[in-house]
């Protein structure tokens, strides 16, 4: 498996046109792509790219590309599984100890696992939509939640979704929303976060009161957040745990694409 050497983050990740292929939406929406006349990167909000992205390392190989979130030590990749694995190995070799975990096309873990020990191997589907979803019953009950609700949100997530990925006060979150019952008690919540490199909207931490599941609260909240993101940003993305049939049915109903099959894992050593 061959890969090129470390390259600066400009448009190199897009030279192969992988972003136009099925299964490469993580590159299309997740990797920052600033203007060629703005090599220093654009301020967040001015052109859709967060500031300073040009200094982040990226790799390009035959049929795959990869880019690093250095703060987390997380390497993202798309393309052919074997070629993506080559980029994981090259990145670890060049930045030894920096790459602690990775996400790539389904099957990349088998190739990387021939060289490293892996833990926490999880299969995901990166899902996305450019269209507003069909209306769901109960959407009118959804309302934005501000910083004054953070303690309430934290308690609710701790009780009903302790494994939530994003919490109140997280810098990546642009919006929290929720549904209350007739007594004013929170019965569902969710957030719009962002993909760290590109800033694209990412739905996260959708949770429903365990005693009220099956009543369409999650569907209403998810549809509302999707509609908000599409209207404000032109798209919405999310991560679905592979094999979660109820979530898959809901996201199918809301119009989310599902051809981007991924695996994530932590590297434990050679």
Image (cartoon, rainbow, N blue to C red):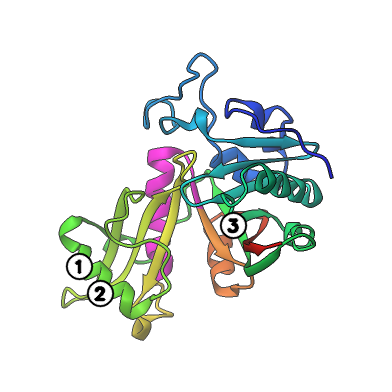
Which of the marked residues, 1 or 3, is nearer the chain's N terminus?
A: 3
Residue of label 1: 151
Q: Is residue 213 above or below residue 85?
A: below
Q: Is residue 120 visible?
A: yes
Res 136 seen here: no
Does 260 sit left or right of 51 as displayed?
A: right
10 Å crowding of disc 3: few (<14), some (14-19), many (20+): many
**In this rendering, would 198 be left or right of 181?**
right
Report the side of 235 relative to 266 (left or right): left
Element at label 2:
helix
Q: Which mark is residue 155?
A: 2
CA gap, disc 3 and disc 2: 29 Å
**Placement of the N terminus among the 4 image quadrants:** top right
How far across and down, in percent of the image, does residue 234 sit? Answer: 46, 38
How far apart are labels 1 and 3 at the CA level? 31 Å
Above or below: residue 226 compared with residue 34: below
Q: Quadrant of the C terminus?
A: bottom right
Disc assigned to residue 83: none
Categorize mark 2 by other alpha carbons within 10 Å: few (<14), some (14-19), many (20+). Answer: few
Q: Which residue is mark 3?
A: 101
- Taking the spot 45% from the left edge, 51% from the top edge, the residue there is 202
Magenta stretch, main secondary structure, is helix
> Residue 5 location in percent, x, y?
71, 33
**What's drawn in magenta, residue-wise?**
217-237
Taking depth in this image into account, of 228 and 6 the one nearest to the observer is 6
Helix, strand or loop under label 3? strand
Give the mark, 3 or 2, whose residue is nearer the N terminus: 3
For the residues labelled 2 and 1, say whether their Cβ atoms are less than 8 Å apart.
Answer: yes
Q: Are marks 3 and 2 in contact (CB under 8 Å)?
A: no
Mark 1 Cα-neighbour bin, 10 Å: few <14, some 14–19, many ≥20: few
How much space separates mark 2 and mark 1, taking CA atoms? 6 Å
């Amino acid at each position: 498996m061959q890969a090129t050497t470390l390259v600066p983050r400009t448009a190199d990740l897009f030279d192969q046109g992988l972003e136009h292929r099925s299964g490469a939406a993580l590159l299309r929406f997740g990797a920052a792509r600033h203007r060629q006349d703005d090599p220093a990167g654009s301020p967040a909000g001015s052109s859709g790219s967060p500031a300073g992205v040009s200094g982040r390392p990226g790799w390009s190989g035959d049929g795959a590309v990869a880019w690093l979130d250095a703060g987390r030590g997380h390497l993202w990749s798309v393309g052919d599984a074997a070629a993506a694995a080559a980029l994981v190995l090259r990145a670890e070799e060049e930045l030894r100890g920096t790459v602690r975990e990775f996400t790539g096309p389904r099957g990349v873990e088998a190739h990387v696992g021939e060289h490293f020990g892996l833990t926490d191997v999880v299969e995901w589907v990166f899902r996305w939509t450019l269209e507003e979803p069909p209306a769901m019953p109960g959407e009118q009950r959804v309302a934005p939640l501000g910083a004054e609700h953070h303690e309430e949100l934290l308690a609710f997530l701790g009780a009903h979704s302790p494994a939530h990925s994003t919490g109140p006060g997280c810098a990546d979150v642009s919006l929290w929303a929720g549904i209350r019952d007739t007594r004013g008690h929170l019965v569902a919540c969710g957030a719009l976060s962002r993909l760290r490199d590109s800033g694209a909207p990412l739905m996260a931490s959708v949770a429903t009161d365990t005693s009220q599941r099956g009543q369409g609260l999650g569907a209403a909240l998810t549809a509302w957040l999707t509609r908000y993101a599409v209207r404000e940003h032109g798209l919405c993305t999310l991560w679905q745990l592979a094999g979660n049939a109820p979530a898959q049915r809901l996201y199918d109903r809301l119009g989310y694409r599902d051809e981007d099959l991924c695996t994530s894992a932590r590297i434990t050593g050679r």
